[in-house]
Amino acid sequence: MSEQLVFTRPEVLADVATHYCPGCQHGVVHRIVAECLEGYGLVEKTIAVSSIGCSVFLYNYILVDTVEAPHGRAPAVATGVKRARTDAFVFTYQGDGDLASIGMAEIMHAANRGERISVIFVNNTVYGMTGGQMAPTTMVGQKTTTCPGGRCLEREGGPIHMSEIIATLGGVAYCARTAVNTIKNIAQTKRAIRRAFETQIKGEGFGFVEVLATCPTNWRMSSVAANERVGKEMIPEFPLGVFKDAAKEE
Amino acid sequence: MSAKRIFIKGNEAIAHGALDAGCRCYFGYPITPQNDIPEMLSSAMPAAGGEFVQAESEVASANMLLGAAACGVRAMTTSSSPGVSLMQEAISYMAGSDLPGVVVNMNRGGPGLGDIGPSQGDYFQSVKGGGHGDYRTLVLAPGSCQECYDLTFEAFDLAFKYRNPVLILGDAIVGQMKEPVARREALPIDPAEGGDWKLTGRGQRAPRILKSLFLEDGALAGQNIRLRDKYAAMAAEVRYEAFETADAELVVVAYGSIGRIVKSTVRALRAEGLKVGLLRPVTLFPFPEAALRDLAGQGKRFLTIEHNLGQMVDDVRLAVRGLADSEFFGFLPGNMPTPEDFDAPVRAAVKGA
């Protein structure tokens, strides 16, 4: 009996090695995004907005029309793209420093306006590209190069919970937090991104998916230990779930 | 009077010029003294089938402009000095990504919060880059409501011709005064504009990437050389008004509202027989260096008048260097000049030498 191939690479995902560190989960999230783009037949009409940080090279891996945004401004750039080209499918791909620190105003207001865009927010609780500095999502006690003694609640405040905040805003059609640390959670992440994309396709409003992911290099951990940390430490701090789904509230 | 001749403020002329030029995306944030523009476009832009967004900040509005520009759509943002400072990040990225867009600065007094009155304190910021990195923007300086309309109308063509941000540098005088303005035939929207680079969704073609990050060895150098050549080519767009310069012994150099006011001073002194003329740069980048150098070669002397402590005078001196110098008279922001305010300095300069 001949072998039958049942699992292939989405064509919109470039057949190249990525620049990401071993154990980094951007690649997993890229693949899910690629599968969802193909699943909905969106590849030809998609305009991606890449942001600043490790994922700036999104355009090297997901083969769609892409514009690069300044640090944190991807939701504003995506607003301009969507307003200029209302028939396009528009998504941003942002890290925690980009979205929850310098870009806090842009994400809040794009969400509140109910811009018909989808935001993929990869939260690994640290600045990756710049070398492991404290992020707004860094957990209390977590050591980084700019909080070497561990993030101190009294001095630096606690981690910002973006999904809980975004879900309170009127223009948001869908808001969920997922993780990619287990097969089950990867499947859930795909369901969430698919639903976020669907809200844009149906014109329901703003779609937001926060994905908890690893940064083994800047966490100073092995890939396996980093993945375990997501389950043991991050998920208790950042609970998974759907925080808002306009369709289900009707 | 032609039906196309309307009596409007300079700010409104900018809004009309943008609409008639086919601008269909406007992003802005309120700041005095340019609020007539977003207020008018909030209803006029949707009525024309376009998009109006009051952004959460000038940072966001300039980045919305970047996004719309990446789609090859004619788009604009407008602001005033402190707001334009916040837009510099996006303007630099647009220059680095070869994106066309129109940014209007109705210059007010500074530094800092300054005041809301007219000033020319943003000359350096406008013509020398303003944001980070090696880049230039085309800078157009209207001196009348008609020029507010015409230069805005033409700014979109220039932005797309060079794939570069174009700045309109006005001030509270030209923005708030009202004059008759002749409108042009509105341009039809050209869906093919930006054809070979704009983002549309890739369809069956290869993906397009609009970016300003160039990490490979030599890549940024190549980009910067290409940009340098582009800025050099912009010299073809130089514009200025020469008034009574042919037999002038003294040429006053002034732009925008101040150029307009100085013209009245020059006219009054001409009536007395004083040999004075005016050169009013309309493009501040490219700067009318050749015209100034030519006048310097004819042995003329120069007086630069600005509504600031002295900024454009540096460019005048560079243009005429080796042949002449330029005196400077700065009228301080926080005050509104009249033609009489320039009488004494021009009279002194023309009799000087």
Image (cartoon, coloured by chain):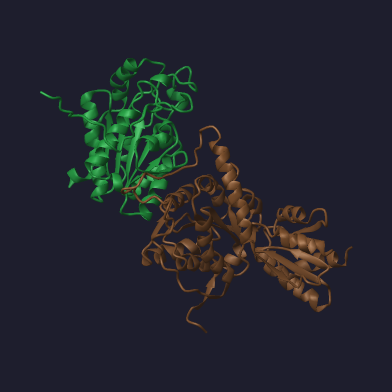
B175 w.r.t. A41: above or below: below
Hey, which quadrant is residue B40 in on the image? bottom left
Residue A35: where, in percent of width, then height? 25, 36
Residue furthest to the front in view is: A2
Q: Seen in the image, is A78 located left or right of residue B214?
A: left
Image height of A220 relative to A62, above or below: above
**Which lettered chain is shown in green?**
A
Residue for point 45% across, 63% down: B39
The residue depicted at 62 percent of the width and 50 percent of the height is: B125
Is residue B45 found left or right of B121 in the rendered image?
left
The one of A65 and A183 positioned closer to us in this rendering = A65
The image shows residue B202 at horizontal and vertical percentages of 34, 47
Report whether B304 appears left or right of B236.
Answer: right
The residue nearer to you, when weighing B272 against B246, is B246
In terms of image quadrants, where is residue A223? Answer: top left
Q: Can residue A55 be seen in this view?
A: yes
In this view of the protein, can residue B116 be seen by the observer? no
Chain coloured brown in the rendered structure: B
Camera-nearest residue between B218 and B243? B218
Q: Quadrant of the N terminus of chain A?
A: top left
Circle count: 0
Q: In this view, does A32 lie above or below A74?
A: above
Residue farthest along the left direction in this orientation: A1
Residue at 43% in and 59% down: B193
Q: As drawn, which residue projects farthest toward the right? A: B353
- Residue B222 position, x and y percent, is 56, 40
- Residue A227 spot, x, y in % from top left: 31, 19
Point out the residue furthest to the bottom here.
B1
**A229 vs B19, nearest the viewer:** B19
